[in-house]
Amino acid sequence: MPPWAWRRAAGTLPEPAGFFADARLPLADHEIRHYGQIVAVVVAETLEQARDAAARVEVACETRPPNADFGRAKRHAVRPPEIPGLPLGRVIAKPEDVDIEAALAASEVRVEATYDVPPRHHMMMEPHAAVAAWDDGKLTIYSGTQGPVAHAMELAAVLGVPPADVHVISPYVGGGFGGKAFTWAPAMLAAAAARALGRPVKIVTSREQLFTVTGHRAASSQTIGLGAYRDGRLHAIKHHTVSESLVEDPGYRAAQKYYATPNAHIELSITPGMNLPPATIMRAPGDEAGSYALESAMDELADRLGMDPIELRVKNHLANTLIGGIPYASKHLEECYRVGAERFGWSRRPARPGSLTDGDDLVGMGMATAVLDAGRAPTTARVTFRPDGTATVACATSDAGTGMATIMAMTAARALGVPADRVVPALGDSRLPVAGADDIYGAIGSAATATVTAAILAAAREAIDALVRHAATAEGSPLRGAGDVRYEEGCLIGAGTCTGAGEARHEKGRLIGAGTSIGFGELLGLTGTAEIGADGTSTAPDDGHAHASYAAHFCEVRVNRWTREPRLSRFTTVVDAGAILNAVTARNQITGGVLFGLAAALCEEGRVEAATGRISNADLAGYLLPVSADAVEIDVHFLDHPDTGLGPAGARGIGELGTVGAAAAFANAVFNATGVRVRTLPITVDKLLG
Ligand code: MOS
């Protein structure tokens, strides 16, 4: 089986990962395609020895001038090959044969501009790292991954062993952001080296190597054309992108799900064969860059029309998907605008750019919309009662720092009617339940909560049924033959033998006050049963509706009038993401996402040396990330309207939502402060001078 033969990473992700799996295989041939590519692996007793030995490796190679300059390459971009089953890269038009230039020309008011986004790297705290050990031809690998089962399948394919012979253990993941969605060289090489040596091998990438031996968000250049009537209604949307890679498709990800228009034209061209490390998905792939461009262009249009940016957006509300006309379920975006404007104080926004000052600061306010498709993938979870009075809830997904373990325990606890501290979550292990050979669900596509909770709720129902049957029939059960046994809050109650049940109460699975109620732990102890459990599954929703999460971001910036340094001063976001299951973990996701997006706006940029393809700022001194001093408290408000069409918990995805639109809100605020429209990220001082 080739490495790309496994199918889908998540219900919401159109990429099957296959079309760039080749690029992730290390040491596959003798071609050096990019600076920093792995050409050898050195294994030693200590890290210091290995590093020293690696530094002594001499590589003899012929050199050619690299194709590493995206700014040059994009002038020769080509239409990507069609990939069966993949909408990426296709021309998406409505109607099919729309003449978008004519539609724009016929519009009363037009804006058209190009927005450039540089390459960006997943700088999660924990680098890619793996410890691999073989035993009797079977691999056990401790490796940070967002999808343990997918990781096992990819490793099996690369190593030429059956997937069942690879056991991936990944209980804690120190951040992924898409960088750990797929399998990269460090884990593959740890496994290969351990097999060759017959000893365990540990590989940890250095911070510098993270820029070159694992993927990144591809650079993109987006041309947006908007045509409108004078009253603000859109007549045409053109969203044409050139990207380094098919993975990053901002037009497809953004333009078709924001605004209603009779004419839309979305197109992607790519610059194949660049001598750069391979691109991959990164938090809100396409959506983040796409929303920056589209929501900046909407701000430019509002300015051109002399219209409030919120009014322009409300006027172009999208009730059904632009392509296909499928109605959106549970869309409360207008409420986000209204509540957000109120909380933020949008009415105080100066209408004229550059007109509000505070001491040496030019103050500006901007807003942007965030839309992120919401999905639910197939997977299985298992809920199990144990004799010690605890229950386990297990699923082969992973917790990449999002709080999934908490959500799993909470969801099972609620379904079982017991306190969360009596539920033990198990995840991050490829041997845990998963739906089937082709369903390899991981923490991807902001779909984990909707997916996993649906499976857990179904499993809990089945497990309770199995427990009740067990209580009524098992040898040793005090409720055996007791008639209608029912389950309540961790206890089993036999109606038929009920005497004085009014006084009986149960706490923490123990019966207090005697009677006919028995805690499940005690029951399993009496029947000598190690566990009673059941599986539950989640499937993709089929309620005939489209589902998406929304947010309205409001940003205030201060730009020093002398140094032109832009600083974030306030940020409010109002989020419509269905039911919020845990306010703490949800708020953390949105806050982290917003800061992720502001990082794109303010500082993050992989700089490629055109002459060599070297990433010249490949460390945390040169690659700027925002720090606490750059942040302010993000005001996050959830509307909390359950979307039960997507799943029984009513929750939609939030992991990637915060970053969508955040850079546009910042850029629009910078325009409002200064009158300068920055169309190339990041928005650095030099771009605000002059
Ligand atoms: Mo996220 S880029 O789907 O891991």
Image (cartoon, rainbow, N blue to C red):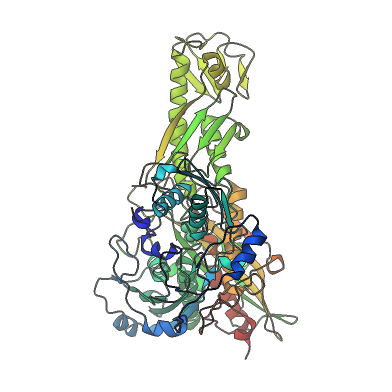
Taking 564 as reference, is 414 left or right?
Answer: left
- Residue 371 position in % (x across, y down): 46, 62
- For image coordinates 48% across by 40% down, the residue present is 395
- Residue 100 position in % (x across, y down): 31, 79
- Residue 363 position in % (x across, y down): 66, 77
Q: Is residue 351 visible?
A: no
In the image, 687 versus 667, the foreground residue is: 687
- Residue 478 position in % (x across, y down): 52, 10
- For image coordinates 42% across by 82% down, the residue present is 73
In the image, 221 versus 203, the foreground residue is: 203
**Does residue 441 sit above or below 629 in this rendering?**
above
Taking 518 as reference, is 541 left or right?
Answer: left
Location of residue 84 (image quadrant): bottom left
Looking at the image, the residue that sits furthest to the bottom is 690
In which quadrant of the rendered image does the C terminus lie? bottom right
- For image coordinates 45% across by 73% down, the residue present is 32
**Does residue 304 sit above or below 183 in this rendering?**
below
Taking 320 as reference, is 335 left or right?
Answer: right
**Does residue 296 sit above or below 446 in this rendering?**
below
Task: Count the marks.
Answer: 0
Taking 278 as reference, is 56 left or right?
Answer: right
Looking at the image, the residue that sits furthest to the right is 359
Q: Is residue 409 visible?
A: yes
